Amino acid sequence: RWALSVLYKNMIEAGKEAIADLTDAEIYTSTGKTTVDKDFTFDSATVNCSTGDVAFFASTKDSLTIKVSTGRITVGKAENGASAHGDITLTTSSGSITVHDLDCKDARITVSTGKTTIYGMRCDSFTSTGDTGDLSMRDVIAKGSITVKRDTGDVTFNKCDAAKLDILT
């Protein structure tokens, strides 16, 4: 976290030109909270965290991948910001995932144990798999398909639409 904070502080001091020059981000943490602010735009970003929470509010052009062993993942639009992504892949073994107010190409969300909440998403396709835990979706629109596979847990849709729905619980 310290290195990311120093990088961010130095870039803000250097001005928006430095932020615009970033292309890829790779962040690896063992423990703690990691937050990527709305001021960044990357071609691609990867965040790996063993134990802790990841909040990602920046935009990516090509891909966003976040993997957390134990903890929460939050991806979405920060206040007064935009959150647009290419493909997104979000994975947690034990924890929760919340995605809100974003546009993306293909979304793949995997939760072994924990709750998943998605609202205000526009995408080409959406896939969510999980062993144990609830999935709540509101205002999720996919041009292609919404695919959901859960071993146990409730799946709730509210104002969602897709060309094809494939739901297995």
Image (cartoon, rainbow, N blue to C red):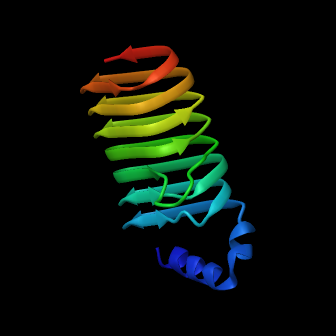
Left or right, 96 with respect to 60, comes to left
Q: Which quarter of the rendering shows the C terminus?
A: top left
Looking at the image, residue 82 lies above or below residue 158: below
Q: Position of residue 42 (x, y in %)?
A: 66, 58
Residue drawn 42% across and 25% down? Answer: 160
Which quadrant holds residue 124? top right
**Residue with the most extreme left position:** 153
Which quadrant holds residue 163? top right
Which quadrant holds residue 134? top left
Residue drawn 54% across and 74% down? Answer: 4
Q: Nearer the viewer, residue 83 or 68?
A: 83
Left or right, 27 with respect to 23, comes to left
Q: How many marks?
A: 0
**Residue with the most extreme front position:** 80
Residue drawn 32% across and 46% down? Answer: 96
Left or right, 30 with respect to 106, comes to left
Left or right, 115 with respect to 99, comes to left
Looking at the image, residue 131 lies above or below residue 57: above
Looking at the image, residue 146 lies above or below residue 94: above
Q: Where is residue 11 in the image (x, y as percent from the top left)?
A: 64, 79
Q: Position of residue 154 (x, y in %)?
A: 25, 26
